[in-house]
Image (cartoon, grey):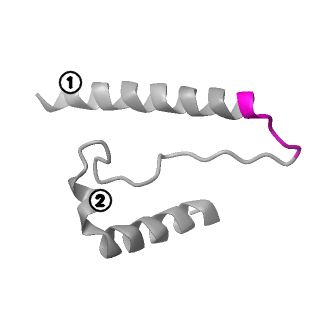
């Protein structure tokens, strides 16, 4: 598992442990971090970061929608 994955997992466990009310928020879905992460060695401007986040959100919504279709 990549270092970033371990870091995200450990911090999520710690935050949910210290602040259990975070799990009650419907938009969290018991997940603190998104599945991916972005790394750049040459730098990114704000517009590229916004586009990256928008694409990730769209992809995650599509995946959640597909998972809900299979659970019914």
Farthest left residue in view: 72
State the residue at coordinates (69%, 35%): 49
Q: Relative to 66, is 6 above or below?
A: below
Mark sitting earlier along the chain (1/2): 2
Q: Which residue is mark 2?
A: 22
Horizontal side of residue 30 vs 34, given as left or right = left
Farthest right residue in view: 42
Residue 63: where, in percent of width, then height?
37, 30
Residue 2: where, in percent of width, then height?
61, 62
- Over which residues does the magenta segment extend? 42-47
State the residue at coordinates (29%, 54%): 30
Q: Residues within 10 Å of mark 1 (few under 14, many from 20)?
A: few
SS majority, magenta: loop
Horizontal side of residue 15 vs 21, given as left or right = right
Quarter of the picture containing the C terminus is top left
Quarter holding residue 21: bottom left
Residue 41: where, in percent of width, then height?
85, 48
Question: In terms of depth relative to the viewer, which is nearer, 64 or 29?
Answer: 29
Q: Nearer the viewer, mark 1 or mark 2?
A: 2
Q: Residues within 10 Å of mark 2 (few under 14, many from 20)?
A: some
Badge 1 element: helix
Residue 24: where, in percent of width, then height?
21, 55
Badge 2 element: helix
Horizontal side of residue 40 vs 72, given as left or right = right
Structural distance between the alpha carbons of marks 1 and 2: 26 Å
Was residue 45 drawn as part of the magenta stretch in this picture?
yes
State the residue at coordinates (38%, 24%): 62
Q: Which residue is mark 1?
A: 69
Please tell me how many numbered marks the rendered image carries.
2
Quarter of the picture containing the N terminus is bottom right
Q: Relative to 13, is 41 above or below?
A: above
State the residue at coordinates (20%, 24%): 69
């Amino acid at each position: 598992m990549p270092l970033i994955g371990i870091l995200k997992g450990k911090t999520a466990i710690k935050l949910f442990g210290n602040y259990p009310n975070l799990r009650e928020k419907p938009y969290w879905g018991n997940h603190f971090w998104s599945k991916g992460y972005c790394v750049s060695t040459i730098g990114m401007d704000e517009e590229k970061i916004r586009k990256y986040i928008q694409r990730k959100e769209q992809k995650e919504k599509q995946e959640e929608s597909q998972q809900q279709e299979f659970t019914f």
